[in-house]
Image (cartoon, grey):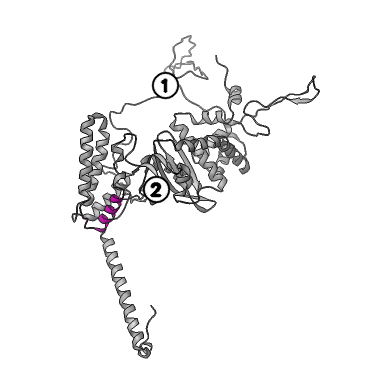
Amino acid sequence: MSTLIRKQLTLSSKEELVDLVLELQAENQRLEKEIERLKERLNYPAKDSHNSSKAPSTDNKANVVKGTEKEGKKKGPPFGHEGTSRRTRAADIVLVEKVKECPECKTKIESDSTTYVAHQIYELPPMRILTIDILRQKTTCPGCHHTVVAPHPEGIENHRAFGPRLEAWVGILHNQHHIPQDRIKVLMQDLFKESLADGSIDALLSRVSDKLADEYEQLRKQLRKEEVLGADETGWRVDGARAWLWAFQNEGISYYTIEDNRSSKVPQAVLGKRFKGTLVTDFYSVYEKIKAARKQKCNAHLLRDLEYGKEVEAGQDDFCQCVYSLIQQAIALAKQREAMKVGEYKKHVLALEEKLDECLEKEPKTKEGQRLKKRIRKHRRELLVFLYDASVPSDNNGTERAIRIGVIHRKISNGSRSDAGAKRFSITLSMIETMKKRGENVFDTLVALLGGSFISAQLEPEPT
């Protein structure tokens, strides 16, 4: 409100003065509430990764003082850990070094001894890109007199400039190891003394995703048939514009898609009108609109929020402590499922359910507790589904780990340069991560999909 001048107040009518007083009273009440809110917030504990969904990278890290117990703590595996060592294998090259003189008395030695001290090292072969000429015979048909040309080798198309092994290697560097395209150019120059233009690298990456597109679509269809599936999303950039990377996964499948929105339209498009399995997610409101046979909310998220609620309560209340303890007991009980008799296990589950309902009858005294109680009551039937189905996890950590792969790529490459690049990344990352879950060798599988059978046969040594 602008500064009031005495003369202006003097000239004001009674009604204007009354309006002004009421306006000032309302503003004063608003400021008092704001002050109280700020005072309350100042008394609240700070949030970090252990009591909220904040990333661990935002936590304040304590300095390690040299000479302290923490500084001198043993690094690496614990004492008693069984070590492993590389196995010896058949050598590609054998170097024989013979004794020429005695190191003690310098006597010249010419010995026929066949006793050797063995030492094996691993080394890379000379790094170079092979150039393969494909000569397709051209001749005249003696029957119809037409000019005919021999077909391409299997998997090799006309005008193709790069082989499947090179394409697979570049695809893995960019999509699995998050190396940006400009750094791939540097690697090609440093390792192979070859210069690749931006367009060539784009063509390599596009060909990889094009070859994987059909399997990517089959993966999306397979998602709808899965019994348990986790979902999560994170921010992305496409040509500088805001977008979102979505992940849908379980122990056997990873599916990614980059979209321009964070609404329920994305999971609905991916999973269909109704998902027949159990959908595991965090508490983001968008997932409430998704129809699924069952839903399991992430208890890791809930426990972190309850941890913060406990700190806010600080002896004033025990609502958050009560729920926190029961969720932890439920997770521990699920881990003991196999060791318990069916009847005994069901008895413990029923007892936990009853205790949680009793806990929710409490009236929290803090606003944080009230907020959490409202959320828990809303999702009450979505918290303990994992106790009834061993295939359902108690949290969404698996999907968060899956989404973290995209976060690493985003931090390095700042997202995608174009819609086509975003689609390409989604396809290739989905297939690479799924190959890993299937126990496949990613490079070998990509080479085969890119038509590498003929080329591999030319490069592999003849069996001895």
Residue on which disc 1 sits? 87
Q: Is residue 438 left or right of residue 26?
A: right
Q: Is residue 3 above or below residue 121?
A: below
> What span is in magenta?
363-379
Residue 106 picture location, percent across and down: 45, 17
For the residue labelled by badge 2, is the local secondary structure a helix, a strand or a loop?
Answer: helix
Residue 250 in picture, x, y percent from top left: 40, 36
* Residue 316 sits in quarter: bottom left
Left or right of residue 21: residue 132: right
Instruction: Name the residue: 36% across, 87% down.
Output: 9
CA neighbours of label 1 inside 10 A, class few (<14), some (14 to 19), many (20+): few
| Residue situated in front as seen by the camera: 267 or 451 | 267
Quadrant of the snapshot with the C terminus: top right
Name which quarter of the figure residue 12 lies in.
Answer: bottom left
Cα distance, mark 2 to mark 1?
50 Å
Q: Horizontal and vertical percent for residue 57?
A: 37, 48
Residue 318 is at least partly visible in this image: yes
Based on the displayed image, in which of its 4 quarters is residue 184 positioned? top right
| Residue 76 drawn at (x, y percent) | 33, 34
> Could you say whether the residue bearing mark 1 is in a helix, strand or loop?
loop
Query: Which amino acid does the dot numbered 1 rest on?
Result: Arg
Q: Which residue is mark 2?
A: 287
Left or right: 153 in relation to 306: right
Q: Which quadrant is home to the N terminus? A: bottom left
Q: Amino acid at mark 2?
A: Tyr
Numbered disc total = 2
Dominant secondary structure of the magenta stretch?
Answer: helix
Q: Residue 278 shows which numbered tag?
A: none
Residue that lies at the very extreme toward the right in this rendered image: 145
- Report if residue 378 lies within the magenta region: yes
